[in-house]
Image (tube, rainbow, N blue to C red):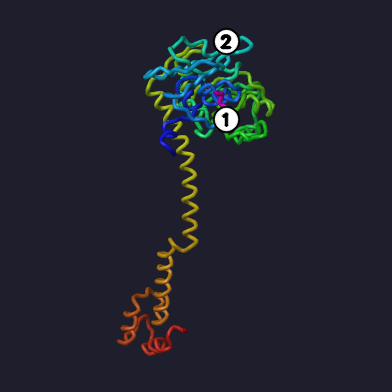
Amino acid sequence: MSSETEMRIRIQKYLAEIGIASRRAIEEMIIEGRISVNRELVASLPCFVDPQVDDIRVDGRKIRPKAGRGKKYVLLNKPRGVVCTQKDPDGRPCAVDLVPDLGSRIYCVGRLDAESTGIILLTDDGDLTQRLTHPSYGVVKTYVVTVDGRLSAEQIAELKAGSYLDGKRTKPTAVKVLRKSPAQSLLEIRLTEGRNREIRRILARLGHKVRRLRRVAIGPVTDKGLKIGHFRLLRPAEVAKLRKVGQDSQSEQGGYAKKGKSVRKRKTLHKSGGPRKSTGARKSVGAGKGRSAGKNGDAGKSGVAGKARSVGKSGTTRKGKAPGKRRSVKKNGDGR
């Protein structure tokens, strides 16, 4: 790789890092023909840019990132009826409208549908956005859901196992029944991916309509002390925890794979006889002792074969066995 290439960065990563939009949104903008580099539309990916040299524009506006500015992290407890987009064609209020101008463009990390409430993170940190939204990182989001009726044990098991949405199987979920009655049930559901209206669609398929859905936690960050419609800035320690949980989740998944490989490797070695050398040695020693015992006619503990021979030569009797008989056994050998 040339030094020129090493100085460049993927355009979606760069634009996400400076707060234009998330990586996925940037890729959609490229498909829509809204991003250009050096006056030419970006037609395909990957596309590498040098921010210090290239003329990068979004919707015709030249991108001039502010040097040295800090990232912004806002936790909002979204009310019902608010959408998680930058602009809504139907004129509905957007989550970003509930947060004052912080000096940089922030955007929602993931989405909650308009009818759902609960916490959502708004930031201009593209790297953290990737960690919290991409399924490969497996960051857990926790929801409290009120549904009509009482779910059976079979339905709970099906909900935990996952089901097919849009032709693709959802990941397994953790489900806990907090309260139940013939009329309504209160569930806690934990997801590691966020399909479009996933919880509502799966429960509707099981015959239970969702009445209320509230997100109460994103990884280690919860809605504790944050009223609906209010927001607060995340503390540096909370940002560090969110970043760490993304790393740990991916490492854990990789660790499971590595453990599986090591187990298979040990099994292979086991079959090849590697680790069984000591076991085989013990068996051979045991067999040797058994043969020496047979030679000396001793059914008890057999010592070293040399000792057994010396006993036989001295003519001493052990457990009533005649010396002559012991010698005849020695002459005949072990039957080989």
Q: Is residue 219 visible?
A: no
Q: Position of residue 154 (x, y in %)?
A: 65, 35
Residue at (49% x, 48% y) in the render: 260
Which three-letter amino acid code belongs to the residue tagged 2?
Answer: Pro
Q: Position of residue 46 (x, y in %)?
A: 53, 32
Q: Is residue 154 magenta?
A: no
Q: Position of residue 322 (x, y in %)?
A: 38, 87
Q: Which mark is residue 152?
A: none
Q: Earlier in the sequence, mark 2 or mark 1?
A: 1
> In which image quadrant can residue 204 be found?
top right
Q: Is residue 241 left or right of residue 60?
A: left
Q: Is residue 121 left or right of residue 209?
A: left
Secondary structure that dominates the magenta span: loop
> Nearer the observer, disc 2 or disc 1?
1
Q: Quadrant of the N terminus?
A: top left
Per the image, the residue denoted by label 2 is 93
Label 1 Cα neighbours within 10 Å, binned few <14 / some 14-19 / many ≥20: few
In the displayed orientation, state which residue is furthest to the front.
39
Label 2 Cα neighbours within 10 Å, binned few <14 / some 14-19 / many ≥20: some
Which of the pair 302/249 is nearer the observer? 249
Per the image, the residue denoted by label 1 is 44
At numbered mark 2, what does the secondary structure look like: helix, strand or loop?
Answer: loop
Cα separation, mark 2 vs mark 1, equals 33 Å
Q: Is residue 112 visible?
A: yes
Q: Position of residue 91 (x, y in %)?
A: 61, 9
Q: How many marks?
A: 2
Which three-letter amino acid code belongs to the residue tagged 1?
Answer: Ser
Q: Which residues are magenta?
A: 40-44
